[in-house]
Image (cartoon, rainbow, N blue to C red):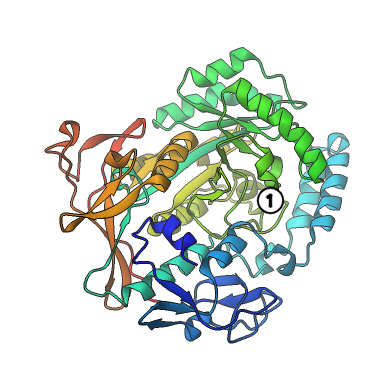
Amino acid sequence: MTRALLDYYRCPEDIARVVPEGRFSEEPGFFRFGSEATCYGRLSGARPARRVDDILADARMRAGVKRRGVALPFDPSDVVDNLRLERYRANTNGWTAKATRTLQSAYYGLRPISPTFVRTSVQRIYYSGWQEIPFPLWPVDFSVDRILQGVLTMLLETRPAEGVPFIWFWPHGFSSCAMMTHDVESARGRDFCPRLMDLNDAFGIRASFQIVPEGRYQVSDEFLDSIRSRGQEINVHDLNHDGLLFGDRETFCARAEKINRYARAYGAHGFRAGAMYRQAAWYDALDVSYDMSIPNVAHLEPQRGGCCTVMPYFIGDILELPLTATQDWALINVLREHSCDLWKREIDMITAEHGLVSFIVHPDYLIRSKAQQVYAELLAHLAMLRSEGKLWVALPREINEWWRQRAKMRIVRRHGGWTIEGPGKEHARIAYARLVDGRLNYVLESAFTAKASFSAVKADNAALPCVGVTQRLAERTTRTSRRF
């Protein structure tokens, strides 16, 4: 029951004492854990709801702190998996997997012969009513994060004076993380990439370019080298972006073999499916280190759902870097916004939780000057947060490297205090979770290190190497208080 909690916080195992309370229901369903976390799984003491818009039982009312640990009427690891892997989807909005596949097959079949205005009209019809979808919560859903925060809060009630030490989420104490990605979907988008890289360079931000290997445009060695030579990253974007990658398991496995070959040829470590179509249970066929195909909330994506977290997580051996901000296409064409306001709102929400702010901005849609202005405003905002030491702006491969290192680290007691063991520990920081007036707070240890290159630095303005890039070290970070 503690696996998800330990993976999330990397805290000592002997502190995470969670035990089941009662007999869980045979069938999974929806319930709440506090006021801000929607759960899907098996529950004891009450019947979980079949639909998310039914009246939901509050599992927090049935949880308690006992001598043997925190007693919960559900398995938090199971519930977290159900949300991250979108197992709840069939019971949320009535769209079954078969219906979704039928619609996407029809759309992509007509796409090559349909004018742009026709495709846009069809898409707007499909997305109409998205505001009425009750779950996940738009624009950012924190259900997974709230569940684990709630369990940690209850654990703290068993040790109020000591707090719970854990390995901080980001290297060198950065408060949050951001990554920029560009899905290249057409020859026009490919040809605009040099201009896009100039725009990124103007703000000192590097990005990952996802390349469609077959069918859409020619992919030359010169084009790939032009991206690598400027310090950008290359990843694979689907196979031919026809919307049918996940049509059935046999098709996916056959195409995955080709995708894996292209990944090796490109030197790519990551993957993103076309149009964010996904089936996490099939990822074992992919020979990549990380995936970027699961949105936090997918109301404005062809495949609805969402993983309900703003933190990376593992699906088997593959690390998922979820999309946590609205895509540029949806921002401009569905919401019809031509400003950075929504993106800034999402940044504020995610950084308040110390999460990963991840973007998809298509070179295909940035050709227009008005779209470039909006994107430049976003880059300027990210650069400002980075300059203030609040944000680690990194490439996906760097985030993947850090998160894998962190997953292998252990926090242990030595000489009356806590220390971190494992490769990469010099980049890690210890944080403490404590209750302040009944609210959960995170506080970082004072910044210091025995390494010569890090010695005598001050946490408010020191420039430090950070998993391959140089950023500012964030000063002591305290999370916004939250009551459960």
Up-down relation of residue 134 to residue 245 (above or below): below
What amino acid is labelled 1 in the image?
Ala
Dividing the image into 4 quarters, which one contains the C terminus? bottom left
Up-down relation of residue 270 to residue 34 (above or below): above
Q: Is mark 1 on a helix, strand or loop?
A: helix
User: In the picture, residue 214 is in which quadrant?
Assistant: top right
Up-down relation of residue 207 to residue 49 (above or below): above
User: In the picture, residue 128 is in which quadrant?
Assistant: bottom right
User: In the picture, residue 422 is in which quadrant?
Assistant: top left
| Residue 221 shown left or right of residue 428 in the figure | right
Number of residues whose C-alpha sits closer than 10 Å to that of mark 1, classed few (under 14), some (14–19) or many (20 or more): few
Residue under the point 23% across and 50% down = 475
Q: Position of residue 402 (x, y in %)?
A: 40, 40
The answer to which of 115 and 349 lies nearer the viewer is: 349
Residue under the point 18% across and 41% down = 449
The residue wearing badge 1 is: 281
